[in-house]
Image (cartoon, coloured by chain):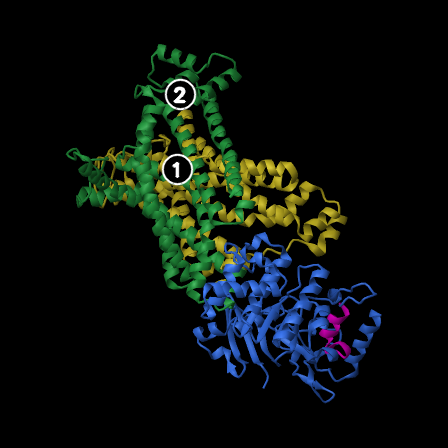
Chain colours: A blue, B yellow, C green
């Protein structure tokens, strides 16, 4: 049984009288010790999925349908108190922008001790010792527990946030753009450390990112999101070697190669769809070079590829030559 | 022409009055406030028709409680309270509009210039705002009006000249944000003069928060005028709601002198505050998201 | 803590210009007042000799820069001018009244601030629901009521008709001895402070506190603690409130000059013998030096309030001390 099974997760945001369809029937599974990359442009719904798994959506967000099974129990069916006990303990999230993720008027150590004591019956001294120990494990000096967030550098804050997540030894960590806003060297350190801890604790990881290179480095599986839906899903090798959705191909062609200059994804004409009125057909059709009449009229169902049950794409032409030709063309232009 | 062509694809994002009104209409109370403001304006405009004798006509009955002839009673000189309230609406509204107008112009100029120039000019002005914000306005106004005379236009100018700081700060913040936006940079790059960029691109986009603030300022101006009149600093040549309250103090038994003009002030001030609330709501997508 | 001291000193230094600007404004008003500045200062009904004495004491017959220095010099020596109406120095006249005003302001402000903040926090905790809406609309309505009118209504209903409270003044004639006197003063203070609280302090602090808490509840660090499984009640009480109090303190400082405005008007209605009533009489008597003195005192009050707000902010928010 997979650790996490998400089925048809649908999230809306109320916006005045309108509703934003931020996540639409999102489904995926994740095994222990595995890493899933959720990738897409900003506004595609990837962060929303993270918030929804923890049920910490902003107050105008509504989970409109679906199931989230963690180790067999449906998180969406839990009452608020039971859900509260799942958070951090079983399922923890590292939010984007460590700058503002720590309460500015509390010393970092005090915050972590408070969280620890909320979940476990430990004495103050014990909590303090464990927090300090965790600080060392993420590469922060023990003395940093006495610091306020504004007294730390961005990298240190990131580590403190990470320490907070690991302290509870959860089964699953959701990391939302953990490397954004850091320079390349720091980015690499952050990723390496995430993987180390993942391996040591055997936990599962969902990595949310807009950056294909981050995904390539760390993930086992990739889910590409566009307009609130997963448009392609597969192992990292499959997705990078044989992308079968035009949007994935576009994302990959924007992935800076080692030699060539980075090319802009938004060489694609057009803008992401207006999610207050999601299109009837394929959400990507208005920007897709391969789009035909059918694409605007009919939403594509997931098509599995070449008998490989784990790789699927929501494109009418996923199995056709023109998609693989597009992929080759993009790869050719790349090198 | 060339500048226009260059800036065209990056033109000012369309302001959508439709969206604005729809969002505003979501707030029922703000719509009610707008209705009250419009009614008051109609009353002020139609004053010669509604109260043809004028506010200063002296009737036989002095200090008369409300009767059929004088629905809101009369004051100690025999002036009809209803007529005074009708004509007083003119004074209150003109005062409010005048104050908001003056502070709007002064605020935009004193806010946009330093923000646009930046550097030490900006720093200097920011300090200036800070000092001005702390000066006890009302005490200054009392002093100036007392020393220089009680003329409604003069008072309006003084109140307007002490009310610009918020507008200046809002304009400054807006200009600083918008200055960085693509379409402004594009026009600058295409050689448009600083002044023209400011006039055509920066100000129209940045004006909305200032307008929301001006609505609230009108509410404040009405109270300020009433307060000055109440303290005996009103213009003796014009009737006003506050002056009635000034008189009412000496004739507390004549309750109608105290009650009715106060209701008028309260309703109009509340109406302006509600409209201001609605305007900020309609303009701020963050507020809107949350309901 | 060293950083904190520095911060306070620096803020204090930044506040000095406000008082200076107010002084210069006073001087300018005297200089450009219509007619003879000396007459303005001495008062409408001053005798010729009084006008001449005033002219000399203020140095109005000397060159402009000397006038300014002698004016500032006078002020530094505590000479705010002479009130011909009261036949006393302005400073003495003001100082007799200031304590009464402070008594009224501080009492109603502390009470109103507490009630308003609690209600505002409560409204924020019911964000977007009926309770929140009712509280917000009610506070906006009360805020739209002019204090002087509400005061008049209270006098009409509770003093004149029901006779529950005295309708004017500070202390009853018969109230002798410490305790009886204090009780009588408190009794006289009920209506004016209720006026101030209902129309000014409670609505203002309700709105400030509500907006501040709502803002903080949307911050990332709140989502962080919520996602860490901290119970909702503690998220609100420990994490949101502690952060929300900082802007409340700062906004409170900004509002205080307004606070005095309301007090002046309220005192007038209830004949409370403070600065407001003094100013009301000074307006009638054209006793300009008293109005100038009141302007200066109001400025000093604002500056002190700002300084206190700054110090409180620095104590509450660790980030400020290093800014």
For mark 1, name the chain. B
Q: In the figure, residue A281 lies in which quadrant?
A: bottom right
Tell me where residue B226 sits by quadrant: top left
Q: Does residue C88 appear to the left or right of B60 in the view shown?
A: right
The crowd level at tag 2 (other Cα within 10 Å; few <14, some 14-19, many 20+) is: some
Q: Label 1 near label 2: C-beta < 8 Å?
A: no
What is the x, y in percent for residue B18?
54, 59
Q: Residue at x 68, y 84 (%)?
A: A310
The residue under the point 58% across, 75% down is: A172
Q: Is residue C305 above or below residue A13?
A: above
Image position of C210 with respect to A252: above or below: above
Magenta-colored stretch includes residue A241: yes
| Element type at mark 2 | loop
Q: Position of residue B120 (x, y in %)?
A: 64, 36
> Is residue A107 among what the camera can see?
yes
Q: Position of residue B93 (x, y in %)?
A: 42, 42
Front one among B188 and C76: C76
Image position, residue A163 (x, y; %): 58, 65
Q: Which residues are magenta?
A: A239-254
From the viewer's side, name the closer residue of C296 and B20.
C296
- Residue at disc 1, secondary structure: helix
Q: CA distance from mark 2 to mark 1?
A: 32 Å
Task: Please state which of the two labelled residues, at mark 2 or mark 1, is closer to the viewer.
Answer: 2
Residue A180 sits above or below residue B102 on the image = below
Q: Within the magenta stretch, is there residue C257?
A: no
Subunit of label 2? C
Residue placed under numbered mark 2 in the picture = C79
Main SS of the magenta part reads: helix
User: Residue C97 versus residue A173: which sits nearer the camera?
Assistant: A173
- Could you say which disc has been placed on residue B225 in the image? 1
């Amino acid at each position: 049984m997979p650790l996490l099974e998400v089925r048809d997760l649908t999230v809306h945001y109320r916006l005045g009288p309108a509703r934003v369809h931020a996540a639409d029937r999102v489904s995926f599974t994740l095994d222990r010790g595995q890493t899933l990359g959720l990738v897409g442009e900003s506004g595609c719904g990837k962060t929303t999925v993270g918030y929804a798994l923890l049920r910490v959506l902003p107050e105008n967000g509504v989970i409109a349908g679906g199931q989230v099974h963690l180790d067999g129990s449906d998180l969406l069916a839990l009452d608020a108190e039971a859900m509260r006990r799942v958070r951090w303990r079983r399922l923890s999230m590292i939010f984007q922008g460590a700058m503002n993720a720590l309460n500015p008027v509390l010393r970092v150590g005090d915050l972590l001790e408070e969280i620890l004591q909320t979940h476990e019956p430990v004495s103050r001294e014990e909590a303090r010792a464990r927090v300090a120990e965790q600080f060392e494990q993420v590469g922060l000096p023990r003395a940093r527990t006495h610091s306020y967030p504004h007294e730390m550098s961005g990298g240190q804050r990131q580590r403190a946030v990470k320490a907070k997540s690991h302290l509870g030894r959860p089964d699953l960590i959701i990391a939302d753009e953990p490397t954004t806003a850091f320079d390349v060297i720091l980015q690499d350190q952050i990723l390496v450390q995430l993987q180390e801890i993942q391996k040591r604790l055997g936990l599962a990881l969902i990595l949310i990112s807009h950056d294909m290179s981050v995904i390539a480095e760390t993930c086992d599986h990739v889910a590409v999101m566009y307009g609130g839906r997963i448009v392609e899903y597969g192992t990292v090798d499959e997705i990078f070697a044989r992308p079968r959705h035009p949007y994935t191909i576009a994302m990959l062609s924007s992935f800076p190669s080692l030699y060539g200059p980075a090319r802009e994804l938004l060489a694609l004409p057009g803008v992401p769809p207006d999610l207050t009125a999601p299109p009837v057909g394929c959400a990507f059709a208005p920007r897709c070079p391969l789009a035909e009449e059918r694409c605007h009229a009919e939403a594509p169902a997931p098509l599995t590829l070449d008998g490989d049950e784990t790789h699927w794409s929501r494109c009418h032409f996923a199995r056709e030559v023109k998609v693989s030709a597009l992929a080759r063309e993009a790869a050719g232009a790349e090198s | 022409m060339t500048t226009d062509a260059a800036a065209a694809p990056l033109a000012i994002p369309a302001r959508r009055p439709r969206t604005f009104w729809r969002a505003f209409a979501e707030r029922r109370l703000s719509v009610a406030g707008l209705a009250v403001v419009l009614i008051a304006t109609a009353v002020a405009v139609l004053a010669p028709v509604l109260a043809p004798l004028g506010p200063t006509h002296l009737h036989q009955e002095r200090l008369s409680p409300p009767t059929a002839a004088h629905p809101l009673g009369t004051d100690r000189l025999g002036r009809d309270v209803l007529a005074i309230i009708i004509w007083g609406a003119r004074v209150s509204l003109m005062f409010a509009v005048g104050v908001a107008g003056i502070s709007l112009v002064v605020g935009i100029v004193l806010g946009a210039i330093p923000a646009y120039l930046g550097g030490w000019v900006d720093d200097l002005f920011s300090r200036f705002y800070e000092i001005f914000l702390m000066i006890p306005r009302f005490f200054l106004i009392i002093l100036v009006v007392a020393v220089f005379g009680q003329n409604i236009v003069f008072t309006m100018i003084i109140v307007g000249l002490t009310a610009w700081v918020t507008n200046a700060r809002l304009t400054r913040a807006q200009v600083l944000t918008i200055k960085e936006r693509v379409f402004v940079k594009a026009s600058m790059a295409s050689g448009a003069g600083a002044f023209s960029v400011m006039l055509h691109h920066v100000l129209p986009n940045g004006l909305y928060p200032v307008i929301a603030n001006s609505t609230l300022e009108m509410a404040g101006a009405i109270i300020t005028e009433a307060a000055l009149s109440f303290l005996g600093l009103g213009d003796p040549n014009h009737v006003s709601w506050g002056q009635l309250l000034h008189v009412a103090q000496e004739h507390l038994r004549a309750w109608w002198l105290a009650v009715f003009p106060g209701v008028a002030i309260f309703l109009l001030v509340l109406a302006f505050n509600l409209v201001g609330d609605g305007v900020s709501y309609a303009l701020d997508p963050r507020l809107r998201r949350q309901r | 803590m060293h950083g904190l001291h520095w911060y306070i000193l620096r803020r204090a230094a930044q506040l000095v210009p406000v008082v200076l600007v107010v002084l210069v404004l006073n001087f300018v008003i005297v200089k450009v007042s219509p007619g003879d500045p000396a007459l303005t200062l001495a008062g409408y009904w001053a005798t010729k000799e009084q006008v001449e004495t005033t002219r000399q004491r203020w140095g109005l017959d000397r060159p402009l820069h000397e006038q300014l220095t002698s004016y500032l010099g006078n002020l530094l020596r505590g000479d705010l001018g002479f009130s011909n109406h009261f036949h006393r120095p302005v400073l003495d006249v003001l100082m007799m009244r200031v304590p009464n005003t402070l008594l009224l302001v501080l009492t109603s402000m502390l009470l109103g601030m507490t009630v308003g903040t609690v209600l505002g926090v409560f409204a924020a905790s019911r964000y977007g629901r009926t309770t929140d809406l009712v509280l917000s609309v009610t506070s906006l309505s009360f805020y739209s009521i002019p204090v002087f009118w509400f005061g008049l209504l209270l006098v009409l209903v509770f003093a004149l008709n029901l006779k529950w409270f005295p309708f004017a003044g500070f202390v009853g004639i018969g109230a002798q001895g410490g305790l009886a006197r204090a009780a009588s003063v408190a009794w006289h203070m009920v209506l004016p402070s209720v006026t101030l609280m209902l129309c000014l302090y409670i609505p203002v602090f309700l709105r400030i506190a509500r907006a501040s808490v709502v803002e903080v509840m949307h911050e990332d660090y709140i989502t962080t603690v919520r996602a860490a499984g901290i119970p909702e009640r503690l998220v609100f009480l420990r994490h949101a409130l502690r952060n929300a109090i900082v802007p409340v303190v700062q906004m409170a400082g900004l509002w205080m000059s307004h606070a005095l405005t309301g007090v002046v008007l309220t005192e007038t209605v209830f004949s409370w013998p403070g600065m407001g009533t003094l100013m009301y009489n000074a307006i009638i008597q054209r006793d300009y030096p008293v109005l100038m003195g009141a302007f200066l005192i109001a400025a000093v009050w604002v500056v002190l309030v700002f300084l206190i707000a700054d110090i409180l902010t620095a104590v509450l928010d660790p980030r400020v001390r290093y800014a």
